[in-house]
Amino acid sequence: MEEEKIHPIQKFMDNIWLLLALGLAIPILSYTLWGLIELLTIEQGTLP
Amino acid sequence: MSTDTVKAAAYRVCETTGLSIFLKAQFFVKINAVLAVIFLLVGGIAALLLALTRWSNVMLLNDIWYYRMVTLHGVNMLVFWIIFFEMAILYFASTTLLNTKMFSKKLAHTSLALMFVGAVVTNYIILKGQADVMLTSYPPLEAHPLFYLGIILFAVGALIVAFNFFATLYIAKKNKTYEGSMPLVTFGAATAAIIAVVALLHGAAALVPTFLWSMGWMEMMDPGAYRLLWWGLGHHSQQINVAAMVSVWYFVATMSTGAKPLNETVCRGAFILYILFINLAAAHHLLVDPGLSSEWKIWNTSYAMYLAVLASMIHGYTVPASMEVAMRRKGYNKGIFGWFAKLPWKDPGFSAVALSAIIFGFIGGITGVTLGTEQINIMAHNTLRIPGHFHATVVGGTTLAFMGLAYYLVPLIFQKDFYMKKLARIQPWLFGGGIVIMSLGMSFAGTYGVPRRTYDSDFGGAVLETGFDPVAHIFLGVLGIGGVIAFIGLLLFLVLIVAAVFFGPSLKGQKMPTWQTDKEQKMTDELISKGYEEEGKDYHVKTPGTIVLVLIFLLSFAIYYFANWAALADLWHIR
Amino acid sequence: MSIFHPKGNWYRPPTGSERLWVGLALAWCLVMSITMPWWHFQGKQNAPQTTYEVEPEAFIQRVHQFVETNQVGEMNNVPIVEPEPGGDAYLLGQMWRWYPVLKLKKDQTYRIHVSSADLQHGLSIIPINMNIHVLPGYDYVMEITPTTSGEFSLICNEFCGIGHHLMTGKIIVEE
């Protein structure tokens, strides 16, 4: 019986664990960490 | 010699679909659905009272109870109702659709207990008057510790359900309980579960320190940081709702018309765009917040160049297109829209899902993307335009789709039939129609600047007087009327479901009764059984009707979008 | 079928109407992706860009100092304060009023510092409908140029306790 060769994009789409990892990493980096860094590095005001 | 085989789990074969329904998982589908609907009722009663208070001629509640009910309504609808129902979907999609028992019964029971206790505790402390802080509980506003604790317990429970879901996916693959790739509906549910993990982790990050602060064990969190983290829970959970809603669309499209996804690659690709990018746009709550740069705001609120919006537009095409193909294959080929008229509008599951897609797309989606641009948000932040938007997405979209799913859940999982089917047929229209009217009332009042979460829109009694154009008040009346109609639609839904589940005639051993004619149902059944065999084969049927519909959508989008930019240009200059 | 598992190699790029729609939708997404950055550079209405960290007490003191040096009248016991055109002004959100009343000149630019003495507030200028979020500990600076004259109301649109619906203020813009 011949093994059907699965297209690499299909392999990616089927890899729910990789998708879980990316789905966690991308928003946490782009939204959460980037945002927190900006909020934590605000200048002191001089109230001119 | 020990047999290292998978312990056989009790299951029954569904008379309608031929799929295996594992009895332990079925219990959890049922109990989560029932609990969901109970909290829907609590949130719904609060909704009616709120609509009759914002309707300025009625102003039913006093100020204290108005603010209390806004909190009660928000928490029960956005957290308890909708997440309980999503847990039911997760149990179904991971077991029945993958032909496997669930990974752990113990985890399922534990998570159920946590979620139930959490929801009860939070409701209790709100009604006791010790948590008048809105769903968002922004510090320095402070609630009684039980408010935070209840939500934390609920979130931990939901996280355990998500873990159980992924573990079930894992053992299904390992034990080869299905061949090939998981079905599209399961893939959509997995998308929802991934987004849920991100959401719940943010919830913990925001609420655990805040709980500790309310106990006096920690300093208050920076309010700007709290908002960032909390909306990681608040908005990401709406994206769980979007993914779950779309999965329901595909499910009901198949069950009601025999539709099959035109191209698995395109549909799954769209879900993947959700997984990667949809959570970025929680930023749209922070567009006029201090401390965050325009770069952060613009990149994140755009869902990474609108790739996640592209995903929604893709589903907005593939779902109706798959149904157009199914209808044309059945012979409904008259003109561009002949198929559309012949769709199973008498099936409340179908009509709920169809309305859900239209309301979510045309009202919810278009307003959401537009209001979520950094600059247009200046005209919208904290006005009633915001609830006008999200009632179209979460209620007209997700809740209505879940109601549609319930019309299938009751006969297939609870194995009960409905009474008053004539009323069931109109229920989605009543609820959907009421929500549309209410949402329009909110949105137009909001364009005048009428604020959200505010008891007296005219600020009567304030030292420096103010007020709104009388036209704004007319729209508040529209809000009120829409809310009343929607509540009647909601109540009808609850009556129909409760009557069926607890008192309905048993369907054990029978196929699910059809809402269509027998001839129509036969054609649908044929397509469903053929579809299984035809997996992977192409058939080229054109979809002119759907193309016209999505072009109308795109035109509406462009008009609304540019009209708002034009209105923005009339404001004072600000930077 | 969406409820059945596709076997074998199902990967296939979009064709026909699907491909057309994906192309059109992507094009629209790219158009939308350009508008925000374009308006950021070319447009006159953008979310305020400047924020400083402040102690609420220090901000409150600065507001009182601003009122003392620039007061020109009062309205219902609330001071009316006129800042220098091109200069800094201060606006405090507190439970439950916006303080003070500002008197501005049309087509002049002001740097209005906004902060909260206590809880989170939402600054909303009506009826023109301009809104920003106000946090304690954060001095959010609006570089603002009124382009219309008249008397404008300020309301609060972020829940801030039982007096939230009594929280108002005023901005007067003269020709």
Image (spheres, coloured by chain):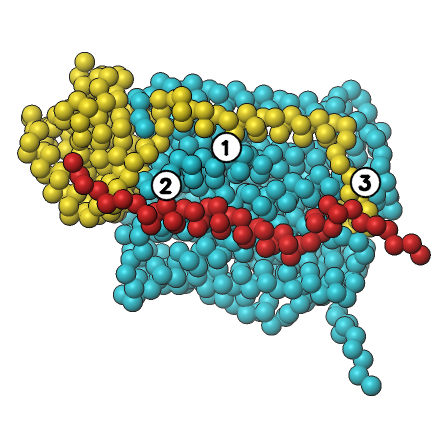
Q: Amino acid at mark 2?
A: Leu
Q: Which mark is residue B369?
A: 1
| Dot label at residue B292 | 2
- B298 or B475, which is in the foreground? B298
The answer to whether residue B463 of the structure is visible from this angle is no
- Label 3: element kind: helix
Q: Nearer the viewer, mark 3 or mark 2?
A: 2
- Indicate the quadrant where residue C98 lies: top left
User: Nearer the N terminus, badge 3 or badge 2?
Assistant: 2
Colour cyan, chain: B
Residue B524: mark: 3
Q: Quadrant of the N terminus of chain B?
A: bottom right
- Image mark 2: chain: B
Marks 3/2: CA–CA distance? 53 Å
Measure the alpha-carbon separation of dots 3 and 1.
36 Å
Q: Residue at x 80, y 54 (%)?
A: B180
Left or right for B257, reference C154: right
Residue C165, above or below B500 = above
Looking at the image, is mark 3 or mark 1 earlier in the sequence? Answer: 1
